[in-house]
Amino acid sequence: MTKISVFTTMTNPEERQDPYKEAINCYRELGDELIIVGDDWPEEFKWDQIGKTFQKGFDECTGDWVIRMDLDYFFHEKDLSRIRTFLNSNSNQPAIAFPQYQFFTPERFQVKTKICVALNKKSFPDIKLNGGGDLCLPTLNNEIILNVSVPQARFPIYQYDSMFRTKEVIKKDRGRFARAWFREFHDWGDRGGDSDDEAFDAWFHMIKSRYRLHTNKIRINSHPIYIKEKLKMLDRDQFGYDAFGLKNNTNRKIKDYLKGYKNRYLD
């Protein structure tokens, strides 16, 4: 029987308002082993800390397949057995890619990308998590494992981003990550600047541009069972309630809907 390990990073989840209890419930049902790393993550850090922490999680896993999950990633309960079957049928592949449904509010999503989170450690133990612009994508023999070069599962990752966080928590988090980026790359890129306010403003500008592409609709009762009640309890202070006003102030054009359709059904 194939053993599945799941690993995630968790740092001050109560303070950062992560849905960690709900996520852990999902991961325990998904895998045979759960590894949690990141409890020693410093408040201020350098960007390569991300890949190093991911690598630690991968190395500690003892499963045949390793699935890397951020704390805002969930699978639907109806897909868990199908995921296991799909992994079993692709034992000669280094990775499996999954479509990523990105949510800012509970009723809409965008198919953001297809992401390689399931890694075949048994057959490809030399996989590293050090690639791409973020220095944490999976690589094999110093080449990034591309989603187009591996089997693509049809079971989505539900990604809830910062939905359960307040503005103050998001500001602090965006500031930390902006400064970490600067320490590594010596520029601010699209991350604003040194202050939490600058970082938040840059983040919210990005959110505005993406939210108009959230053209796919979903009923709240169709979300994974692990997170459904938490979504129903969102309050006005949390980003996911109305995306800080964007829910009722975003005008979507026909081209946005066409792009959303293409991303979900044709790509």
Image (cartoon, helix red, strand yellow):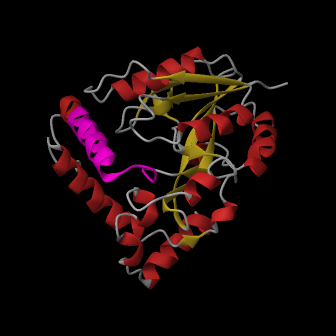
Q: Tell me the quadrant of the picture where the N terminus can be found.
A: top right
Picture coordinates of residue 181, whole percent (x, y): 24, 36
Q: Relative to 103, is 259 above or below?
A: below
Relative side of 259 to 245, left or right: right
Residue range in magenta is 162-181
Residue at the image position 39 percent from the left and 18 percent from the top: 40
- In this rendering, the count of numbered labels is 0
Residue at the image position 39 percent from the left and 29 percent from the top: 50
Q: Return the residue found at the far bottom.
A: 254
Relative side of 245 to 223, left or right: left
Picture coordinates of residue 85, whole percent (x, y): 82, 40
Q: Is residue 173 visible?
A: yes
Q: Relative to 251, is 21 above or below?
A: above
Residue at the image position 65 percent from the left and 58 percent from the top: 223
Q: Relative to 215, is 69 above or below?
A: above
Q: Return the residue found at the far right.
A: 1
